[in-house]
Amino acid sequence: MLLSGCSWFDSLTVRSQSPEDIDEIAAETKLVGDLAVPFGMHPIRIESVGLLTGLHGTGSDPGPCPQRSRLVDEMKVRGVKNPNAVLGSRNVALVLVQGYLRPGIRAGDPFDVEVRVPSRSETSSLRGGYLLEARMTELAALADGFIHPGHELATAKGSVLVDPSSEGRKDSAGLTHGRILGGGIAKKNRDLGLVLKNEYQTVYNTSRIANAVNRRFHTYDKGVQIGVAKAKTHQFIELVVHPRYKDNVARYVHVVRAMAIQETEMQRAERIVRLEKKLLQPETACEAALQLEAIGKPGCNVLIKAIQSKNPEVRFYAAEALAYLDRREAAEPLGELARNEPAFRVFALTALSTMADYTAYEQLRDLLDVPSAETRYGAFRALCAMNPNDGLVAGERLGDQFSYHVLDAAALPMIHVTRNRRPEVVLFGREQRFLAPLALNAGPQIMVTGANADEIAVSKYAVGESDQKRIVSTRIDEVIRTVVELGGTYPDVVQLLQEAKAANVLTTRFEVDALPEAGRTIERLAADGKKGTADEGETGSVPESPAPDLFQQKAGKKSSAGGDSAAEGGKSAAAEPDSAKKPSPVSRFFAKIAGRGSD
């Protein structure tokens, strides 16, 4: 027995040094993703019937229908006397309201909502309209043939942004659809979760997984450290989003699923050796980087070595993982990739926004002055996500209508407006001016006119009110502030800028949602940085990192975290980029006035 035992020990010692056996041992390590799948990673569609006011004769009295009955009942609950008389006015309209609650959204978080008139409605335009508060729920069609609402999940209200370039019968659909940016407010948290696969559903397994996750991630409540995972039943684990991943929930879930449930230090060391080999190969670099990120500090040295690689994919995946580990070594390569590689830009900017190190702040600050419009605005949004109160990007709430930012940018002047997340105007450069002569509309009641190069008149004409007129300089900043002082809304300001650009009295660059996008392809190189051999028909590779939420453009777009691997998530995010989809009537005018490519 002693001889046999010695032989067994010697064979184990030899096997532990074999690369093939290292792979075998590493493969035996059970990851969270082997036992569990994510829950709550799809957006929830919520709907309502709402009342739009302020339409200046373009509304209509809705005919008998279930939507009208629901709206009348809601008006009665809110204390409106004689709701049928209110609906009879042509200054109001019944509209259908729809929005999506994204994965991980918290109570109080805003989201975009879309409004449209029902079919057969006689409402001709929603321009200038304001949605009164509407309660939004999930709707279900039951066997009795009726539509039944669920619990109230959010409320919605605000000014409707309608295509300013739509003209009567030429684009009637554009006039009867609109969007309220950040108009929805969630009333409940949407926590994520992990559901164990059928064959692993035991209390023992949920406890083991929760403990493994909590060893890596935790938050604080009144100074007390609290784990992010909680085993609720034998099959479900509740998962709170870690603050570092608030703008990239899909990546957070991928990292959690890449964690080892239980392994010794020796097993972890052997797995790191194996992951180092995979990290240096572009085809497997994303998966390896996510596992090293899940390991945490012990995996940093391998990632730091990899950012010296000549291959841009290897360098990117290593730097991205280091950024979520808040290592300053990630800042410079990510800044370079955001500047020069459009396919990596959206991921690099999001990763930089998660870092607390000043080197990341410097990289983003420098990107504010590059020629690319999407890089400049992307860096601005990343800086806001990093610290919204920073003096460089902190703006003001103009007229309690929208966020307004004026930056001292050294590059060519630019104006940027948004159609997602929140109403926002950003001026890159303080001294931008309108050219004269000009005659522009800022909504249905405000006109901006000027006959000389020194002065502009901003006038308001409203039925039942005395006319108002202000004389200001041609500075765009001053004109926008005056429009808001006279009661102008965010849609009114957008219309003003769009008309100015179309009339060639706005000489600076004007951009709408100039956002970096996921799903762009790159030419895959070999590990040594040289051009690789592509398969027949292959034109390039798509970055496999989970698509972040920070620059997501389309409401209701599914997260990429539902797959079983990082590669699967990346491909699903890239399969149908927003730019390839047929634009909605609301968004067509943005395409017309933006007129931009990737830069």
Image: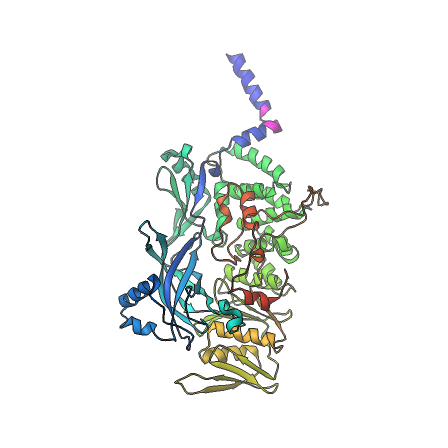
- The front one of 593 and 268 is 593
Q: Is residue 302 magenta?
A: no
Q: Is residue 463 visible?
A: yes
Residue numbers of the magenta segment: 15-20
Q: Is residue 296 visible?
A: no
In the picture provided, is 336 more to the left or to the right than 155? right
Q: Is residue 64 above or below residue 128?
A: above
Residue 463 image offset from top left, x and y in percent: 41, 84
In the picture provided, is 339 more to the left or to the right than 265? right
- The front one of 204 and 471 is 471
Determine the residue positioned at 40% across, 50% down: 191
Extreme residue toward the right, this view: 530
- The front one of 361 and 150 is 150
- The front one of 319 and 531 is 531
Residue 206 image offset from top left, x and y in percent: 39, 37
In the picture provided, is 343 more to the left or to the right than 76? right
Determine the residue positioned at 35% across, 75% down: 89
In the picture provided, is 105 more to the left or to the right than 326? left
- Total label count? 0
Instruction: Place residue 58 in its image quadrant.
Output: bottom left
